[in-house]
Amino acid sequence: MLSVIIPSYNEEQMISMTAKTISDVLVSENIDHEILFVNDGSSDKTWDIICEEAKKDPHVRGVSFSRNFGKEAAVFAGLSEAAGDACVVIDCDLQHPPEKIPEMYRLWEQGYEVVEGVKNSRGQESGVHKKAAETFYKLISRATKIDMSRASDFKLMDRRVVDTIISMPEKKAFFRAVSSWVGYKKTRVEFDVAERVAGESKWSRGALIRYAISNITAFSSFPVRFASYVGIAMIAAFIVIGIFAICIGAGGNPTGGMFLGLLAFMFLIGGIVLLAIGIVGYYVARTYEETKGRPRYIISKKV
């Protein structure tokens, strides 16, 4: 059986359409399946509609969080609750094309354990959003040593892969990176990002920035090393400014040279210390969160 996992946050306009679209695709291909919606603490009627769909279609299941825990938590909850021999993670807004699921499933039947959906294009996004996404994926690719330039959460995984991922004890795991990091036999299916049919994206620029910082620090120690690189760069800048200050002093303006040198030194020390403290402090906070041992999510209801 194939489990289709759909994280859902304030998607009351999409639940019925998504359930029907995916069900029609899989039924037409004679693929035994379940459709598992994970309600991530929605404030609209998302859960009520999931319950209605579960009454109409025996393939539909749902779990609901006690509050909003975030998309990553919803994905991991879906993987933990899924009963299938293989699992597909797909967005509720249908921007990941459901018609690609049978292709992924057939590749799984051929022996592939991870079938990744990779983007041909990002759809109609603003230039700022596309540039921000490119920058994020360059950073995360460099930090994780995994090419994630066209990566997405849209992927199919064998039960062995799913069990490996959900057995990891870390609370702030980055699904997109972890599912690549675990290895196993992989292949790719390319797709074009479709336009959202109804509703609005729940990702503001601020939310995307927080998401990027959280996932980079969750999966890599690169920012801590980056502080060392910045320190080296600032020392180099201090040397250049220091030489310039000496030249000014030698040219008959000792006061100006001394002032410039002192200013450069203050910027050097202050910048390095504040940057290093900030980055190390962020990791200390993440370590503190992990040691508390709280669950990734709390499920309050099932249907």
Image (cartoon, rainbow, N blue to C red):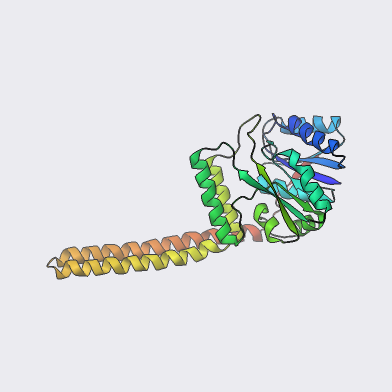
Residue 174 seen: no
From what the image shows, is residue 252 above or below residue 92? below
Residue 177 spot, x, y in % from top left:
65, 56
Q: Is residue 127 left or right of residue 235?
A: right
Q: Nearer the viewer, residue 139 or 150?
A: 150
Residue 123 spot, x, y in % from top left:
59, 38
Q: Is residue 235 left or right of residue 242?
A: right
Residue 47 seen: yes
**Residue at the location (35% across, 64% down)?**
268
Q: Is residue 241 left or right of residue 248?
A: right
From what the image shows, is residue 170 above or below residue 207? below
Q: Is residue 257 left or right of residue 94?
A: left
From what the image shows, is residue 225 above or below residue 175? below
Residue 104 spot, x, y in % from top left:
77, 47
Q: How many marks?
A: 0
Q: Nearer the viewer, residue 141 or 34?
A: 141
Image quadrant where residue 52 sits:
top right
Image quadrant for the C terminus?
Answer: top right
Image quadrant where residue 30 sits:
top right
